[in-house]
Image (cartoon, rainbow, N blue to C red):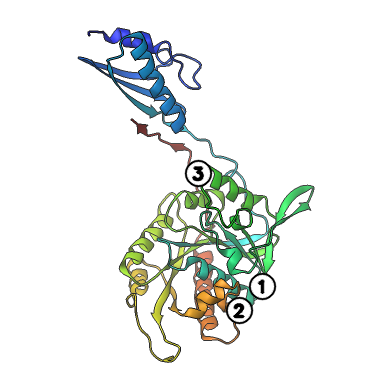
Amino acid sequence: MSFKKQEIYGALEKISAPGEGKNLVESNSVTNVVVFGNEVLVDVTIGNPTLQAKKKIEVEIMKIIHDEIGQKIDVKVNVKTKAIEVKPTSIVEDKSIPGIKNIIAIASGKGGVGKSTITANIAVSLSKMGFKVGVLDADVYGPSMPIMFDVAKERPLSVNIDGKSKMQPIENYGIKMLSLGFFTDPNQAVIWRGAMATKALNQMIFDAHWGELDFLLIDLPPGTGDIHLTMVQAVPITGAVIVSTPQNIALADAKRGVAMFKQENINVPVLGIVENMSYFTPEELPENKYYIFGKDGAKHLAKDIGTTLLGEIPLVQSIREAGDVGHPVALQEDSPLEEAFREVTKNMLTELVKRNENLPPTEIVRITTMSGCGTK
């Protein structure tokens, strides 16, 4: 059968563009129509970026062409989303967390390197040094702080602060904390899109009564994704600590984590790298060190990228056991592991003092535009 491009445009005038209030042709949503024999290619650009809207308009275009012109036409539809302007949301406008002096992000390039364990024990070490400490568990898909601090069954209460209802962080061992683990079923997977996770984090940051804190440690998820961007847009992070293990694949991911914070539009100072699982020492051979995952990997990486090795934490069974029972190993008085975490924390504080003396306060990241992508 034969048909003309004008017939295709005529059919498309009977479909409304999602959210536009006009038909596809009138709203200039149809960017191109190509007719080649029995085939039709229609390029459409819409304002609604959701997959549902894209699929809906694709189905409607195919149906109207088949109904109005011919059932045997081979119709291909390419739906793209318009580049849209996203105004800075309330999360980045004139907001700060009153009473919090330093915000430290604890990050890792990959999962399984013990980032949450390092976060928990640095928090304990800071508290034992006399600082007021809070922990925000921002690992939305794998929150573990409630277990590590033996408060998994606790739930934050609502308190009235200056006429506003606020969440009261859970407190144990002198450390305040909030985590999505307090609000989700531990037996269910957290299946959230980025916007939902962002909203939840926004509430835990700004709708909580943190009080006066010297440090708020943010336990970030592995990688360099949406949650990381949310945090640097939400609060002015004073500095970041990167956690890695010695093997090459973990170090490569850690390098990417450092690069993210050093990007020009993010520009969060990296205080240093903590090498976890540096070596294994058997209980029966306390003087022996076995470098199972390699030796001095984080030390060389720190030198290569111009940052500091904050310390090395050994691979010891008691660290894992202490976390599992909700009693971080840094709580153990006069133990080698307490000393190891104290050393890491002291080195972090040294780098923080240098950072605060030599650099201006970190600004929140302001990103105002994003581009859409096409689907077929």
Q: Where is residue 270 in the image (x, y as percent from the top left)?
A: 45, 63
The structure residue drawn at horizontal position 46% and vertical position 27%, both measured from the top left corner, is: 53
Q: Earlier in the sequence, mark 3 or mark 2?
A: 3
Assess disc 1: are there few (<14), some (14-19) or many (≥20) residues with their C-alpha within 10 Å of its C-alpha: some
The structure residue drawn at horizontal position 63% and vertical position 77%, both measured from the top left corner, is: 128
- In the image, 103: left or right of 368? right
Residue that carries the numbered disc 2 in the rendered image? 331
Q: Which of marks 3 and 1 is nearer the N terminus?
A: 1
- In the image, 239: left or right of 60? right
Residue that carries the numbered disc 1 in the rendered image? 173
Residue that carries the numbered disc 3 in the rendered image? 193
Q: Where is residue 83 in the image (x, y as percent from the top left)?
A: 41, 31
Q: Which quarter of the figure has residue 80? A: top left
Assess disc 3: are there few (<14), some (14-19) or many (≥20) residues with their C-alpha within 10 Å of its C-alpha: few
Q: Quadrant of the C terminus?
A: top left
Determine contact: label 1, label 2, CB under 8 Å.
yes
